Image (spheres, helix red, strand yellow):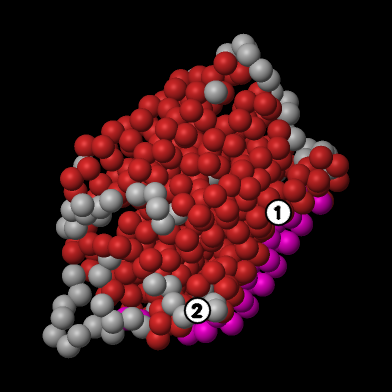
């Protein structure tokens, strides 16, 4: 297969880690936008419930609106990327995310808060597949596991920094106080400014032309992509894993922390998860190209099942405390994230035809989005029915189902 100019440059000796400067600009921009996520996302339910007065079950359910909006944004982004290239689509997505964060900062009720969550989610759903596509086209296939693993590790560096800053504010300012109502919105304003800074670096990374399609070659669009039997098992497993490791992970800990009157536990959770990812990144980068992608996903399923099982005794009132259990869950989740970070996009881009690469990456993001939507909804239902123990057991079961799907489709040729 002939290499593009960008891929040829990426493969030359002397480039840091084998990546061209454009890749490092994209990674730096992603690092900054990750800080925006860490500054706000872990504290969203607390902000909506205690600062804005939204009922806890409603606040938890509102988190799912980001995923609902992304179900629309992901497929639209894929078509736009294949038509216009990743750069303009990525810039547009970051601008929309910044607008959503500003909306949340000024939200005064459930409707405004829901709009802010949805707009923010829409922006991320457009920018994420654009970033994945740009990284895939700027590096040779052999480097895909490494670049995606590095991207995820750097993302968590930014996430940890943002979470630490947000945690300092939460620890010093009571969210339900008058001071909290005045100070906490500035977290979302600061996050919007970070998104704008990320846009500057993404723009500086240069143009990415849409793929050239040979004359007379029709574009099959999403119908062609969804007919690919190598892709479908990966998407199914990714959806189940996302429900467990992203959707429930983002929604359940705030509910458990509020019930235990320990909102500060969320800071420890986020920092422990990010530290695990960052500390484990050198090992993951070293073995990213040696571990079979299917095997990496199976290990992710096992680690994420254990992450929720260790919380069962603490919620049931036995064993160690909730904060310790959440930290253990964060460490196990972080280890699984390192594995899936390199394996999933590498599998998807390995089977993607060049003219549909944007759509393939969008479908990968869509499968993750579906899980991110299902997780908060399951958590909200469990909160309303006081069934948190059942939720934790269900999470472990879903991880097991993802592993079973991967095992049953071993011969599909995706590993």
Q: Which residue is mark 2?
A: 13
User: Most prominent secondary structure in the magenta stretch?
Assistant: helix
Residue found at the far bottom of this picture:
215
Count up the numbered dots. Answer: 2
Residue found at the far front of this picture:
13
Quick check: is 202 in the magenta stretch?
yes
> Along the horizontal axis of the image, is 314 left or right of 164?
left
Residue for point 41% across, 57% down: 289
Percent of width and height locating residue 127: 49, 66
The image quadrant where one finds the N terminus is bottom left
Picture layout, residue 56 above or below residue 339: above
> 15 and 230: which one is in front?
15
Residue for point 66% across, 40% down: 272
Picture layout, residue 200 above or below residue 311: below
Percent of width and height locating residue 411: 18, 45
Q: Which residue is mark 1?
A: 162
> 193 and 108: which one is in front?
193
Circle 1: is it few (<14), some (14-19), or many (20+) Cα within 10 Å? many
In the rendered structure, which disc, 1 or 2, sits on the residue that comes first in sequence?
2
Q: Is residue 305 something that shows in the picture?
A: yes
Percent of width and height locating residue 396: 43, 27
Residue for point 68% across, 43% down: 271
Q: Secondary structure at mark 2?
A: loop
For the record, the magenta segment spans: 183-211
Q: Say which mark, if any, is on residue 237.
A: none
Residue found at the far left of this picture:
216
């Amino acid at each position: 297969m002939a290499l593009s100019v960008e891929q040829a440059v990426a493969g030359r000796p002397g480039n840091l880690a084998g990546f061209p400067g454009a890749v490092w600009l994209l990674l730096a921009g992603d690092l900054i936008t990750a800080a925006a996520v860490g500054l706000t996302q872990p504290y969203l339910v607390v902000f909506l419930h205690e600062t804005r007065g939204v009922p806890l079950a409603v606040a938890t359910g509102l988190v799912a609106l980001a995923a609902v909006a992304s179900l629309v944004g992901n497929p639209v982004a894929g078509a736009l990327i294949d038509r216009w290239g990743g750069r303009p689509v990525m810039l547009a997505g970051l601008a929309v995310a910044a607008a959503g964060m500003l909306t949340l900062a000024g939200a005064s009720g459930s409707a405004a808060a829901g709009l802010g969550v949805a707009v923010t989610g829409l922006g991320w759903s457009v920018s994420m597949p654009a970033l994945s596509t740009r990284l895939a086209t700027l590096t040779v296939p052999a480097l895909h596991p490494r670049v995606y693993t590095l991207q995820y590790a750097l993302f968590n560096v930014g996430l940890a920094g943002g979470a630490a800053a947000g945690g300092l504010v939460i620890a010093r300012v009571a969210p339900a106080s008058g001071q909290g109502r005045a100070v906490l919105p500035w977290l979302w304003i600061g996050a919007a400014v970070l998104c704008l800074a990320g846009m500057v670096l993404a723009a500086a990374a240069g143009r990415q032309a849409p793929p050239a399609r040979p004359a007379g070659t029709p574009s099959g669009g999403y119908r062609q992509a969804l007919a690919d039997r190598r892709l479908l098992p990966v998407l199914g497993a990714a959806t189940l894993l996302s429900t467990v490791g992203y959707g429930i992970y983002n929604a359940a800990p705030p509910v458990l922390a509020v019930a235990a009157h320990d909102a500060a536990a969320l800071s420890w959770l986020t920092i422990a998860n990010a530290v695990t990812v960052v500390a484990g990144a050198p090992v993951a980068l070293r073995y990213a190209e040696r571990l079979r992608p299917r095997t990496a996903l199976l290990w992710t399923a096992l680690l994420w099942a254990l992450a929720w099982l260790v919380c069962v005794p603490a919620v049931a009132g036995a064993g160690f405390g909730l904060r310790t259990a959440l930290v253990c869950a964060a460490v196990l989740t972080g280890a699984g994230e390192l594995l899936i970070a390199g394996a999933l996009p590498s599998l998807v881009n390995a089977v993607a035809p060049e003219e549909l690469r944007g759509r393939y990456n969008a479908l990968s993001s869509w499968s993750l989005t579906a899980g991110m939507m299902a997780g908060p909804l399951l958590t909200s239902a469990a909160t309303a029915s006081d069934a948190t123990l059942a939720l934790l057991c269900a999470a472990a079961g879903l991880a097991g189902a993802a592993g079973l799907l991967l095992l049953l489709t071993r011969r599909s040729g995706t590993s």
